[in-house]
Image (cartoon, rainbow, N blue to C red):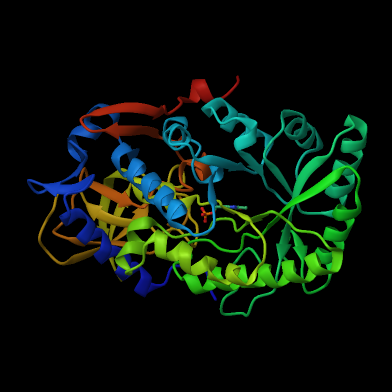
Amino acid sequence: MTNSVTLNQRRVASSATRRLLRQDGPFHTEAGEIWIEHLSCREIVKPLGTPLLVYSAARLRDNIAEATAAADASPRPVRIHFALKACYLLGVVSLIQQAGLNVEVMSEYEYLLARRIGFTPDQVIVNGPAKRREFLERAVIDGVSLINVESLSEIAFLQGLGRRLGRTINVGIRINPLLSRRLRGPFTPPGSKFGFDVPGGEAAAAVTRIARSSFLSLQAVHCHGYTRQYRPDAHRAQVSAVVRFLRRVEADLGILIPALDFGGGFGSRYLMEAQGQTFRRFIRAMLEPLAALPGDRQIIIEPGRYLVNDAAVCLTSVLACKRTAHRRWALVDAGRNILPPRENAEYVVMPCQVSSGRTVYHVGDFLCVPSEPVPMSVVGGAMRPGDLLAVFNAGAYTFSMAQNFGEPIPNAILVDKGEWTWLFKKRSVEEQFVK
Ligand SMILES: *Cc1c(COP(=O)(O)O)cnc(C)c1O
């Protein structure tokens, strides 16, 4: 399975975005323009400039409600931990925290950010293939909900820490079951840097090691295999593989592992729904194999993209239009500083002024390197410098992965009905660098 967004998926995403704009939701067209809640894009950029990352509070709240409803509808209890790496903006993640969701972090920096947002340690899951020892110590002393271990050296360190502190540390173990090529995710190829391999026996050996330790208590099995996965059968195959693993190790060791953490890797909500899927049905379908597992278990999911991706657009201005041998270009002022190139990004571009016409423009950035993400294209009437474009699906892994390249990371705001508030202010050269 390749991970790149195919031409066909891009067509589906473009037509889904056009349909989304025709509904009367947080993103809609009115008087020939794209609006975000009660503000037109043209009005929004006037005082703030472009590029500008704009989140809709209404869409965020709705995505949170949808995820919560899916968890509540599940026959097994499901706890949601937002994967913080998808978005670091405090004003965005605060809405997630206020709604009662939990959080997942991969570093001490993310942990401190989560605490600043208001998450308590017992709402935090710590993941990561390699964690700083000072961070592990802080996480244990603070009493985080769960630390998923990914190496024998980490197990040994935590065991020593437990002895030193005279207490039992709750841990989970991240495993890599080997799925068929068709269903395997990008995080779990054979030889992945993540977790412990199941086929080679490393995972079972690590479980034994933890189960025999007097200072560690095995609370969870964790598996995160996917990104932007719209097919529940892939997630279900992963759940099946975890169930097979559990049945074997639990029988061998006479233990019961109370929590199962299936990570994230769900697609953008409106694209999922455009394909006839809902989060509720997705979760139900993926968890079906749990019927074969005895005992009460707490289920954990760690969605990142699903909660935030379709809640933001990046507004960008056309700086130059040109015609070359093969195409018409519209070169814009958003580059890697807010739309980092990733082969799994799902950016969809639309002109903010609705225009008739069938001219296809290639959208490129202003940077002195070949334009990525390529190809983004926009269809409409003739374009001119100064025209405003909206890039949809810009809420996940944009700000958090933005690069200081060519221009600084731009302003970001949250729109709530007719008002906007700051999420991030662009820094000048003087503010950014020490002289
Ligand atoms: C990145 C990550 C997630 C979130 O993934 P999404 O594709 O954004 O849902 C969850 N858990 C772990 C361990 C991750 O690395």
Rendered residue at 73%/66% (across/down): 246
| Image: 11 above or below 265 | below
Residue 259 lies, in percent from the top left, at 66, 53
Tell me what residue is drawn at x 81 percent, y 47 percent. Answer: 217
Question: Would residue 91 appear left or right of 175 to someone viewing this image?
Answer: left
The answer to whether residue 132 is left or right of residue 316 is right
* Quadrant in which residue 46 is drawn: top left
In-image side of 155 versus 112 (left or right):
right
Work out whether 62 lies above or below 193: above
Where residue 236 sits, quadrant-wise, is bottom right
In this rendering, does residue 323 appear at all? no
Quadrant of image for the N terminus: bottom right
Q: Position of residue 362 (x, y in %)?
A: 30, 62
Between 56 and 432, the one lying in front of the other is 56
Q: Name the quarter where the C terminus is drawn.
A: top right
Answer yes or no: is residue 56 visible.
yes
Task: Between residue 24 and residue 164, name the one nearer to us.
Answer: 164
Residue 268 in which image quadrant: bottom left
